[in-house]
Image (cartoon, rainbow, N blue to C red):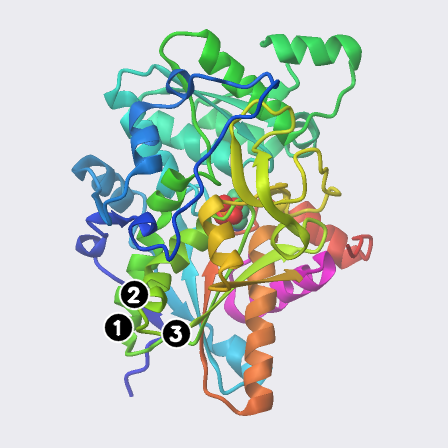
Amino acid sequence: MTENFRINLTPDDVPKNWYNILADLPLELPKPKNSEGKDQISDLQKVFTKTALEQEFATERNIKIPNEVRELYMQMGRPSPLVRARRLEEKLNTPAKIYFKREDTSPTGSHKLNSAIPQVYFAKQEGVENLTTETGAGQWGTALSLAGSLLDVDITVYMVKVSFNQKPDRKNIMNIYDGNVFASPSENTKIGREILAKTPDHPGSLGVAISEAMEEALEKDNVKYSLGSVLNHVMLHQTVIGQEIKTQLEIAEEEPDVMVACAGGGSNLAGSLFPFIKDKIDGNSDTEFIAVEPSACPTLTEGNYEYDFGDTNGFTPMLKMFTLGHDFVAPSVHAGGLRYHGMSPIVSLLVKENIINPTTAQQRDAFNAGMTFAKCEGVLPAPETTHAIKAGIDEAIKAKQTGEEKTIVVNFSGHGMLDLKGYAKFIDGSMKNC
Ligand SMILES: *Cc1c(COP(=O)(O)O)cnc(C)c1O
C-alpha cells in the first residue's frame, strides 16, 4: 500500500518564482495614503530598500527568486515536508484527512526566514550596512538576525521591553546570530529617550519599537528598516510555502477542501494560501480558506475595514485594512505574534470579498489543541500555530458529523520549543482563557 504519510520534495523543487497575487485580485488594492497633521514619514525611500518598495507595488504575476536566495532557501531546509497527521485523524476518529505543512523545520523554527533571507539579500545588494527592525515575541528578530549573519549585514532589533525581560532565550538566540538587541523603549533614539524621560518603567509596545527602528533608518545613512509581516512584499516572499504545498498535494493526488492558517499580520496565511486562492478566483476550485485569530485580538472578525496607521504613533502611512484601531492594546496572550491591531491589506481585501473566512480561538482551547497535536504527531506547535490546529481539528470533527472524507491542510507556522512557559501555565491551570 502506498500511502502518503510524508511528502518530501527535492531541493530542485524549491519554487523559482514568488507568486504575486496583486496580478489576480478581483478588485484593485486600495493604495496607502498619508493623513494631514500627523508626524508621518514622508520619504519611504529613506526608510525601505529600493527592492522592497518595488515589490510592494509590483503587478507582474511571477517574480523571479534570485539564485542566491533560492540556494539559501535550500541550505536552510526548503522545501519543507508536508505530513499527514495520521494519528491525530485516528484519535479524532474522523474520515477527514489532515495534512500539515512543516514551516517549523527552518533553523529558527518558523516561516519568518522565507522573507528575512530575501530582505537581507536585497539590502546587501543595495549597499545597506545595517537593517533595523522591531520584534514582539522574537520570531522575526531571530530570523532577520540569522539572515544577517548568513549574508553579512548588521541587524539591530528593538524588542518590546516586556518580552525582552520575559523571554531571555529569544534574546540569547538573536545574540548568537550576531543580532544587536535592545529593549524598547531604549536610549538609542529620540522617541525612546522622550518616552523614558516621562515614564522610566514603560513596558514598551510594538508601536513604540516600530517607531524606534524607523527613526534609526531615517536618521542614519546606509541603514534601512525591515518589516516581517503585513506588507505586500512580505506576503510575496512567503508564497514559496503554498507553491510547495501544491506540488506535494499533486504527488499525493489530493485536492484540498479546507485550508487553515493562523493570522497575526497575515504572512504565513498569505504564503500558504495565495497560490490556491488564485485557483478559486479563476473559478477552478471551491476550497474553503480559514484565517484563525485569537479572540483576545479579533482583527478580522470584529475590526473595521478602514484606513489606519501601521504603528501606535501614526508614524507610518495609512493602510486600508481590517483594524481594531492603532491604539488598541491586546491583552498579553502567549501568542505574541498574533497581537497586532491591523492586518495585511491583501488578506483584508480577500476577507472583505468573502474569499477567506475568519474565525477566532480562545487561548486555552488553542493550547489544548496544541497539546493533543503534540501527543499524536510529536511536534509541539508555537502558541500562534495552535490557533490553526484548533480550527483544523474543528473541521475534522465537523467532517465526522457529516461523514465527509474531507482533505484538510493546516499550515504549521512554527514550533513551540521556546514557548514552554506558556505550556507550563496551561498545564498547571493558571492560564487565563481569553
Ligand atoms: C510571526 C508568527 C505568526 C504570525 O505572523 P503572520 O505574519 O500572521 O504569519 C504565526 N506563527 C508563527 C510561528 C510566527 O512566528
Left-right relation of 217 to 189: left
Q: Magenta region: which residues?
A: 361-382
Q: Which quadrant holds the N terminus? A: bottom left
Residue 189 on the magenta segment: no
Dot 2: few (<14), some (14–19), or many (≥20) neighbours within 10 Å?
some
Dot 2 amino acid type: Lys
Q: Does residue 19 appear in the picture of this structure? A: yes
Q: Residue 422 vs residue 347: left or right?
A: right
Q: Which residue is mark 1?
A: 250
Regarding mark 3 in the picture, which secondary structure is present there?
Answer: loop
- Residue 256 — which label? 3
Label 2 – label 1 distance at C-alpha: 6 Å
Amino acid under disc 3: Pro
**Residue drawn 51% across the image and 26% down it:** 34
Q: Would you place residue 114 above or below residue 168 in this image? A: below
Kindly identify which residue carries mark 2: 246
Disc 2 from disc 3: Cα separation: 9 Å
Tell which residue pokes out farthest to the bottom in this image. 403
